[in-house]
Image (cartoon, rainbow, N blue to C red):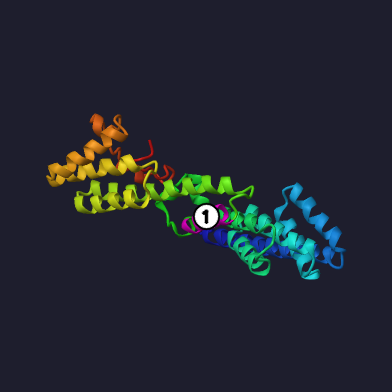
Amino acid sequence: MTRTPSVFRVAVILSLLAVFLASGCSRLRGDREEVNEGVPVEELYDRGHQSMRYGNWSAAATTFRRLVAQYPYGPLTEQALIETAYAQYKMGNNEEAISSIDRFLRTYPTHRNTAYMYYLRGLVNSNRDTVFLQRVWSLDASRRDLATPNQAYADFGIVAERFPNSRYAEDARQRMVALRNMFARHEVDTALYYLRRGAWVAAVNRATYALETYPQSEYQSDAVAVLAEAYTQLGNETLAADARRVLELNEPDHAWLQGRNWPDYPWAIRKLNPFAGERSPLQD
């Protein structure tokens, strides 16, 4: 008889606590804005950098935004926009970071730090869809929506092509290679999905697409193995033999050639464990 009132009281207390915390955070933000009101531009910039040194990205972003609002022109304003975007990226506020970066690129298209801003946009887009559960449960990025990783690839491509001598170009190229391998793995994973379900023609089409679109990727031998297996199952001995020959030339110790368990599909019972994370047949 007392259970329902008790649950009700707990719900009310939690609601009041949430309101209190929200109002407290708003009050803190307001206090921070008031503290920065009318402060000279150099001092504001130093305050923002001090917050960044201590890893207080929220305070840094607030301070730099106040600087831009109070002093819309000048070299420190330009730098404050850059620092704002970086602080937002470190906070995980990816949408806000993209907005700040795009604003900077529109306002200062020939700025000396343009290469860095494209590079930073690539970093943000690389992590844009990495939600909390993906980080905690190690979900495979190649099995998620690839729209923002594709945008990251384009951002890094701008750095590598338009600013080949910048300090960010080499790292951008390496990140493009990693993203390209992720795209290839996505295609091969899909081909394996069709292979497991006996959709041999669909598996052939997806593996062929992976080979044609992402040649020389880390997963090209796996794509060829899919072709060999699918053509074998279809009874096309000529194409199966061709795929086997290519695989023997490029990766003679591939598991499919050795007759080992390939692809190594995860147990179906694994899906019943919400903490197990995703596992690709290509994981090993």
Against 247, residue 201 (above or below) is below
- Picture coordinates of residue 95, whole percent (x, y): 58, 63
Residue 15 visible in image: yes
Against 77, residue 126 (above or below) is above
- Picture coordinates of residue 36, whole percent (x, y): 83, 63
How packed is label 1: few (under 14 Cα within 10 Å), some, or many (20 or more)?
Answer: many
Q: Predominant secondary structure in magenta?
A: helix
**Residue at horizontal 30 percent and vertical 33 percent from the top:** 254
Res. 21 image quadrant: bottom right
Nearest the eye: 224 or 192: 224
Q: On the picture, is 191 further left or further right than 179? A: left
Magenta residue check for 15: no
Nearest the eye: 37 or 169: 169
Magenta residue check for 153: yes
Q: How many labels does the image show?
A: 1
- Picture coordinates of residue 68, whole percent (x, y): 76, 67
Q: On the picture, is 48 further left or further right than 16? A: right
Q: Which amino acid does label 1 sit on?
A: Gly
Q: Which residue is disc 1 drawn over?
A: 157
Nearest the eye: 158 or 25: 158
Res. 15 image quadrant: bottom right
Query: Please, what secondary structure does the residue beneath circle 1 have?
Result: helix
The quarter of the rendered structure image containing the C terminus is: top left
- Picture coordinates of residue 222, whole percent (x, y): 31, 41
**Residue at horizontal 36 percent and vertical 53 percent from the top:** 213
Residue 266 visible in image: no
Q: On the picture, is 244 further left or further right than 65? A: left
**Residue at horizontal 68 percent and vertical 66 percent from the top:** 108
Res. 239 image quadrant: top left
Q: Give the range drawn in magenta.
A: 150-162
